[in-house]
């Protein structure tokens, strides 16, 4: 293997030399300044910057860690997506005025020129199905359904007036994670791992953990779109192989596998010596990584070995697919240098059409399942000194109406329809202004009246904290430079420290 | 020497080199009387520095450099910025030098270099002659370059392709590689033509010299595996998949289209015809079923059935996708840019997008969950019944009626779908139907029966004592017909084909009116809707009433309308009275409609010919007209990419002004011209031309020296060595282990995949592992669910087919290694290969397995490596025989030798020589 490593190093040096020269000649003949300034995103090519300087490392390992173009505030992201869109009116957006309107017909002015997914005709209003208290030093509001949240409320910056133009699950989830409601664009985790690579090459750089089911939009929400497929999210599963095809076949011991791998790499090296194709060296490198990944992934996925007090803190359910387990896994992963950990927790679509999705039943269960682990995650990161270099994002794909849903004209259990005009998200961790509240909704939580932020603003802010300018971070596809934030998005400075 | 110092020296050397090159180029640029060329010298500067503020998107100060008329026209200042023949008087040049940073251009950006300013100055002084980007000029016949004799001496010139390649190599002082050994080139050819390793007998006849190279190539083209291989390429472009794409991502049956592509490629349907049938097969005179299936090309757009979504929004999204895809596939043009604004740097106007959209905006599909219109795959006896009706109509009716009946039987079109109706009371419009409860009523605006007196409806009834009353222009308006409901049919979501199609007589209406539908009932037993209606349609009466046999045929008509079978979504053009209007969307937003537009092709490209109808068919003919500059170049470039791993224009998706220039412009044009003329658009001929070249046949070995000079093989001084595609890697493993089925066509199959991949809350896990030979079909037949594609294919860079994919980007990742080492599909293949050799002496077995898999003889050192692995495995199993109980998860006891051989087979299937095509 020494020989292989030596060859790999030589190849890397050769390519580095070659690439920098090629880059220099091809892109910079007209602007000598670009090279000295260094930042790959600001290099002298116009409009659609290529990523030239580090192609050498990238050709051997497409996940090689790369410096961010600007000073980053965080190294990793843990994104907690509550699939189905949790009701802001029962969690963070306290609306006493709405209580007064409870079960009264909705004023027609609120229905004019509005489109709903399921509400038809004139629905009734639905008062908050929760009580609220101010908590922590900041005195921010939180509902009685989240009793553990007070422990972390001062770490969190709230966005109370997020809006989206999509009010169906699939497209809204796509917009939230890929910047476009239509399928086909890369997800934010793909963008980030494409731009930054990963610190730990023995684990996937972009990990997806689900509980309760797959998001409505399917695996496309963590797809790599037009980016190379290596940047798509890798789902680490609680059942079966944690990563597909990770486990050695039956009858093949670790030791024998090692021999197999050595033999493959040995023959591939001979092939390289004969044909001289550098791609063979890359393959050798990838096989070594695969072998290491087979050990490191199960290790990181094993929560049994965690101390009891930690398990207790998160409320894990070993052996099951649970949000609590996923929160603990998320911590373990960022600790190990995984760049982007995406959690999806399914079951927040509180229409009220059946008890499972009613605000007085299924919704309460979801609150209970997530409240403690989320508090634990933030406290655990904090006690390990990781909170400052990690960004935690919490939210759904849209918000819920202050009206009581009346599907096909019938009012069922308490539930709310989809709405995109105003909903709450929060962020915590490195670079975030602790305890901040940005944005305000009207008296019934129907629309934002101050500090409205869009989905693209959220994305721009996440990228900013990782050290990207979202307007410059582009990828050329079908002849045009694409951005995660499309042609929109502003960094939300109000919640930055 | 320290590294730092070394780097410094390298940098100094490089800068010196630069200064030298720069000096040379300055000399050329500055030398007197040099005629500046717009396309290659001026346009790149304008694109780079000016066009983002003065182009198709922004037109600051009323100045744009996109079109000649705009660049030379009067700006907001009241005078032109460019004065022909006088750079010094031209504001454009003055602004480049200006001392005030507020006025100096580019605004707040670094100034242009002296060299650039000099080019622009000379250009204006020489008259500011405008030019056309190379890719927008018609394809002309190109002369072959004369190459140096050294190439002929090296036996390199085999066909005209090599003349172009040699000329460029000569410029770079490169010499070609020697030809690949026969076994290597035989395998490369087989993969490039059929996507499979060569048939061992055919391989043997070629290697032994029994047949020559060209015979070998021709034999490969004869194999129907050709169509299966090249269909992968086309289906990526066509975004073909077996599901609808959004949210639940339910299944769709559109595999007849996939099979059509395979067959069309195999019979070498000329590319112009191939194009016309897919874009406008329905508009051809009396189209065949095949030509209708071909139109499913544009029904591969996604469909959104999520509850509460707006069908019109997703219908428009599909139409937009069709426009974008058409330009991506045929024109290497990023038309999607023009959806929201004028093209930032290519000469396409915002409005032109909608002119093109108008061609595509009049099809009858409307994002309905049953994906209508669908073509039913009728059984022969059913076709007989259909023909009895059609023949009757042709005997007793006119041509117009014939078409009406044919369309109605085949497509159930034209109809008015439920989602166009509005609720008045006690009713709902949801998903594919409207439902009426007691006292319920709905209405639809502006329907026109054209005097036809049959009203058809597709419905499901939940009551036997209710009627639908059809009224004109109001809830109390004149009754035009009444329909007595009966409990019949099945609910849509349980059975999308389970509703009943039936008809009633109505009064004669020749003008458009608003139609009101009311429920009349005495029935209190039904709590919810009494009836659900999917669509209504107006048809003339069956002609020939009173003639002998009328009752029989009329009866047959009712029957054939209710026949069921495999559906293929196809394209159907709305009749004139139901034509949609197309508007420009303000900034691409479909909700904000601006001026109405008429169909038309982009002005910059080829002119429209009088004889073409102004519809989709005409548009398709315009696209494949020999004067269209982009269609043939695009095709040639992409086929070249398939064979050589990269395009002659490296930006495969774009040939616009921002595209990389072609590495071999003459070759691109020569092939494009010949493709349209001497090759008559034959894809097989084009591919053959490429693989017959000496360029293709070179060995792919590369020395460090060559790598340093031409790392990307831009000059083709060595043969291509490509990693096999996702489908090829899988097919090959099955082929060499003797498992691959050669069964063609039919619904997508579900080979084994890990549990839990297809989890959807509403759908459950619907992956049903195929039985028998369907487990071992070629990858092209694997069921493709867009939101959860077959995992091992995705890992090897196949797409999810949500949108048109021009180019797969090949990656090399650890997850790929895990697939070929551990995926049960590959384990089964390894085991099968081992079993075929278990009776041989172990060394012989290993030699033969290696040879069977790679079509090479194992080098001695490689063989040693495999032999020692065999020994390791053997002794491991001897020590721990328990390992063999369920070895490789095969559910059976395996003997030590077979298991050890399977380990070797598994290793062989992970070798670079196995995963690449040599």
Image (spheres, coloured by chain):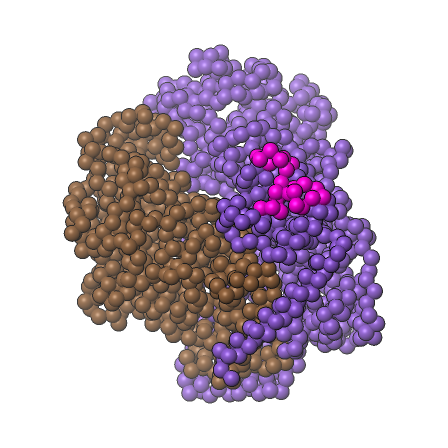
Quarter location, residue A381: bottom left
Q: What's the colour of chain A in the image? A: brown
Instruction: Using the image, determine if residue B527 lies above or below residue B337.
Output: above
Outermost residue, front direction?
B99
User: How many callouts does the rendering have?
Assistant: 0
Q: Quadrant of residue A469?
A: bottom left
Residue B694 image point, x, y percent: 76, 69
Work out whether B105 lies above or below A241: above
Q: Main secondary structure of the magenta part?
A: loop
Closer to the camera in the image, B475 or B70: B70
- Where does residue A55 sit, x and y in percent of width and height? 53, 67
Q: Is residue B164 above or below residue B593?
A: below
Viewer-proximal residue, A196 or B671? Answer: A196
Which residue range is magenta in the image? B73-95
The spot of residue A461 in percent (x, y) is 37, 52
The colour with which the image depicts chain B is: purple
Is residue B820 located in the magenta-colored stretch of the structure? no
Horizontal relation, residue B294 to residue A339: left or right: right
Tell which of B568 and A17 is nearer to you: A17
Q: Is residue B741 visible?
A: no
Relative to residue B578, is residue A416 drawn left or right? left
């Amino acid at each position: 293997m020494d020989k292989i490593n030596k060859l790999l190093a030589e190849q890397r040096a050769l390519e580095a030399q070659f690439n920098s020269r090629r880059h220099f000649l091809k892109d910079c003949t007209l602007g000598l300044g670009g090279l000295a300034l260094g930042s790959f995103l600001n290099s002298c090519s116009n409009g659609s910057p290529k990523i030239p300087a580090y192609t050498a490392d990238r050709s051997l390992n497409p996940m090689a860690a790369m410096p961010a173009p600007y000073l980053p505030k965080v190294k990793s992201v843990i994104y907690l997506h509550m699939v189905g869109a949790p009701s802001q009116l029962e969690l963070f957006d306290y609306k006493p005025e709405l209580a007064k309107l409870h079960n009264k017909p909705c004023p027609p002015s609120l229905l004019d020129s509005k489109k709903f997914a399921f509400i038809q005709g004139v629905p009734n209003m639905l008062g908050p199905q929760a009580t609220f208290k101010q908590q922590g030093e900041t005195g921010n509001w939180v509902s009685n359904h989240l009793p553990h949240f007070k422990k972390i409320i001062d770490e969190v910056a709230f966005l109370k007036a997020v809006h989206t133009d999509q009010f169906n699950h699939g497209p809204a989830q796509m917009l939230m994670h890929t910047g476009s409601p239509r399928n086909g664009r890369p997800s934010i985790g793909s963008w980030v791992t494409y731009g930054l690579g990963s610190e730990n090459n023995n684990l996937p750089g972009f990990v997806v953990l689900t509980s309760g089911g797959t998001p409505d939009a399917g695996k496309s929400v963590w797809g790599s779109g037009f980016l190379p497929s290596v940047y798509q999210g890798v789902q680490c599963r609680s059942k079966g192989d944690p990563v597909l095809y990770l486990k050695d076949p039956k009858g093949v011991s670790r030791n024998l596998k090692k021999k197999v791998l050595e033999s493959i790499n040995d023959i591939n090296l001979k092939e390289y010596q004969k044909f001289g194709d550098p791609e063979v060296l890359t393959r050798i490198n990838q096989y070594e990584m695969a072998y290491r990944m087979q050990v490191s992934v199960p290790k990181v996925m094993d929560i049994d070995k965690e101390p009891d007090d930690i398990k207790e803190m998160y409320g894990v359910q070993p052996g099951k697919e649970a949000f609590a387990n996923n929160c603990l896994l998320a911590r373990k992963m960022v600790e190990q240098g995984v760049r982007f950990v995406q959690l999806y927790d399914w079951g927040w679509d509180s229409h009220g059409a059946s008890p499972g999705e009613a605000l007085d039943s299924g919704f309460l269960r979801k609150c209970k399942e997530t409240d403690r682990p989320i508090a634990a995650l933030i406290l655990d990161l904090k006690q390990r000194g990781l909170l400052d270099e990690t960004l935690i994002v919490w939210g759904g794909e849209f918000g819920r109406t202050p009206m009581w849903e009346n599907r096909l004209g019938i009012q069922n259990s308490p539930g709310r329809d989809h709405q995109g005009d105003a909903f709450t998200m929060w962020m915590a961790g490195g670079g975030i202004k602790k305890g901040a509240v940005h944005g305000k909704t009207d008296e019934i939580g129907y629309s934002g009246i101050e500090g409205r932020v869009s989905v693209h603003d959220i994305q721009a802010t996440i990228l900013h904290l990782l050290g990207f300018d979202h307007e410059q971070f582009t990828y050329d596809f079908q002849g045009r430079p694409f951005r995660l934030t499309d042609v929109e998005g502003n960094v939300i400075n109000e919640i930055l420290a | 020497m320290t590294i730092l110092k070394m780097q410094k020296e390298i940098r100094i050397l490089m800068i010196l080199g630069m200064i030298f090159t720069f000096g040379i180029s300055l000399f050329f640029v500055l030398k007197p009387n040099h005629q500046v060329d717009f396309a290659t010298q001026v346009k790149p500067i304008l694109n780079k520095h000016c066009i983002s503020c003065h182009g198709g998107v922004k037109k600051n100060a009323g100045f744009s450099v996109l079109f000649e008329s705009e660049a030379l026209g009067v700006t907001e200042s009241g005078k032109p910025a460019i004065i022909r023949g006088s750079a010094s008087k031209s504001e454009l040049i003055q602004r480049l030098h200006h001392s005030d940073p507020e006025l100096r251009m580019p605004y707040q950006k670094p100034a242009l270099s002296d060299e650039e300013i000099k080019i622009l100055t000379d250009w204006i002084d020489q008259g500011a002659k405008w030019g056309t980007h190379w890719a927008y000029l018609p394809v002309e016949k190109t002369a072959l370059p004369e190459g140096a004799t050294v190439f002929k001496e090296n036996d390199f010139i085999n066909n005209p392709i090599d003349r172009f390649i040699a000329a460029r190599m000569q410029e770079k002082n490169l010499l070609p590689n020697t030809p690949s050994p026969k076994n290597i080139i035989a395998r490369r050819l087989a993969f490039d033509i059929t996507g499979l390793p060569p048939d061992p007998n055919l391989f043997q006849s070629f290697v032994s010299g029994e047949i020559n190279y060209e015979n070998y190539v021709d034999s490969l083209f004869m194999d129907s595996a050709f169509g299966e291989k090249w269909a992968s390429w086309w289906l990526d472009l066509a975004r073909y998949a077996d599901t609808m794409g959004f949210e639940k991502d339910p299944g769709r049956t559109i595999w007849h289209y996939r099979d059509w592509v395979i067959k069309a490629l195999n019979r070498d349907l000329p590319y112009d015809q191939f194009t016309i049938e897919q874009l406008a097969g329905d508009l051809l005179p009396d189209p065949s079923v095949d030509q209708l299936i071909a139109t499913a090309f544009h029904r591969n757009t996604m469909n959104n059935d999520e509850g509460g979504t707006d069908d019109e929004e997703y219908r428009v999204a599909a139409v937009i996708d069709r426009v974008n895809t058409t330009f991506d596939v045929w024109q290497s043009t990023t038309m999607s840019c023009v959806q929201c604004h004028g093209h930032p740097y290519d000469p396409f106007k915002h409005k032109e997008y909608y002119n093109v959209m108008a061609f595509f905006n009049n099809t009858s599909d409307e994002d309905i969950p049953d994906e209508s219109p669908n073509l039913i795959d009728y059984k022969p006896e059913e076709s007989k019944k259909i023909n009895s009706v059609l023949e009757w109509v042709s005997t007793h009716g006119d041509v117009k009626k014939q078409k009406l009946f044919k369309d109605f039987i085949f497509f159930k079109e034209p109809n008015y779908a439920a989602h166009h109706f509005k609720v008045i009371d006690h009713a709902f419009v949801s998903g594919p139907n409207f439902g009426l409860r007691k006292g319920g009523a709905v209405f639809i605006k502006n329907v026109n029966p054209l005097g036809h007196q049959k009203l058809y409806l597709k419905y499901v009834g939940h009551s036997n004592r209710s009627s639908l009353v059809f009224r004109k222009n109001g809830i109390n308006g004149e009754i035009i017909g009444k329909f007595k409901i009966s409990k019949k049919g099945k609910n849509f979501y349980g059975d999308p084909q389970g509703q009943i199609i039936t008809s009633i007589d109505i009064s004669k209406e020749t003008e458009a009116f608003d139609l009101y539908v009311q429920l009349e009932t005495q029935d209190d037993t039904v709590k919810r809707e009494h009836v659900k209606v999917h669509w209504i349609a107006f048809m003339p009466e069956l002609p020939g009433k009173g003639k002998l046999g009328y009752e029989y045929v009329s009866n047959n008509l009712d029957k054939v309308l209710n026949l069921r079978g495999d559906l293929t979504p196809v394209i159907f053009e709305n009749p004139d009275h139901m034509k949609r209007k197309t508007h420009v969307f303000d900034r691409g937003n479909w909700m904000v409609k601006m001026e109405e537009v008429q169909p038309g092709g982009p002005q910059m490209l080829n002119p429209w010919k009088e004889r073409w109808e102004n519809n989709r068919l005409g548009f398709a003919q315009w696209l494949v007209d020999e004067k269209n500059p982009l269609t043939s170049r695009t095709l040639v470039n992409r086929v070249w990419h398939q064979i050589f791993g990269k395009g002659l224009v490296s930006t495969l998706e774009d040939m616009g002004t921002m595209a990389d220039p072609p590495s071999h412009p003459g070759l691109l044009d020569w092939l494009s011209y010949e493709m349209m003329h001497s090759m008559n658009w034959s894809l097989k001929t084009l591919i053959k031309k490429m693989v017959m070249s000496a360029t293709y046949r070179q060995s792919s070995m590369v020395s460090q020296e060559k790598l340093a000079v031409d790392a990307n093989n831009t000059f083709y001084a060595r043969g291509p060595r490509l990693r096999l595609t996702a489908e090829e890697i899988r097919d090959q493993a099955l082929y060499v282990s003797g498992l691959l089925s050669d069964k063609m066509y039919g619904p997508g199959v579900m080979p084994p995949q890990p549990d839990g991949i297809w989890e959807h809350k509403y759908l459950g896990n619907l992956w049903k592992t195929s039985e028998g030979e369907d487990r071992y079909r070629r990858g092209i037949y694997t069921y493709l669910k867009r939101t959860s594609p077959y995992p091992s294919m995705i890992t090897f860079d196949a797409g999810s087919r949500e949108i048109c994919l021009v180019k797969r980007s090949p990656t090399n990742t650890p997850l790929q290694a895990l697939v070929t080492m551990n995926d049960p599909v590959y384990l089964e293949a390894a085991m099968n290969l081992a079993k075929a050799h278990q009776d041989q002496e172990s060394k012989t077995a290993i030699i033969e397995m290696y040879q069977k898999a790679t079509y090479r003889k194992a080098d001695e050192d490689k063989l040693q490596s495999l032999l020692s692995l065999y020994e390791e495995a053997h002794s491991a199993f001897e020590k721990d025989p328990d390992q063999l109980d369920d070895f490789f998860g095969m559910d059976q006891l395996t003997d030590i030798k077979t298991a050890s051989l399977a380990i070797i087979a598994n290793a062989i299937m992970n070798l670079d020589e196995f995963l690449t095509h040599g």
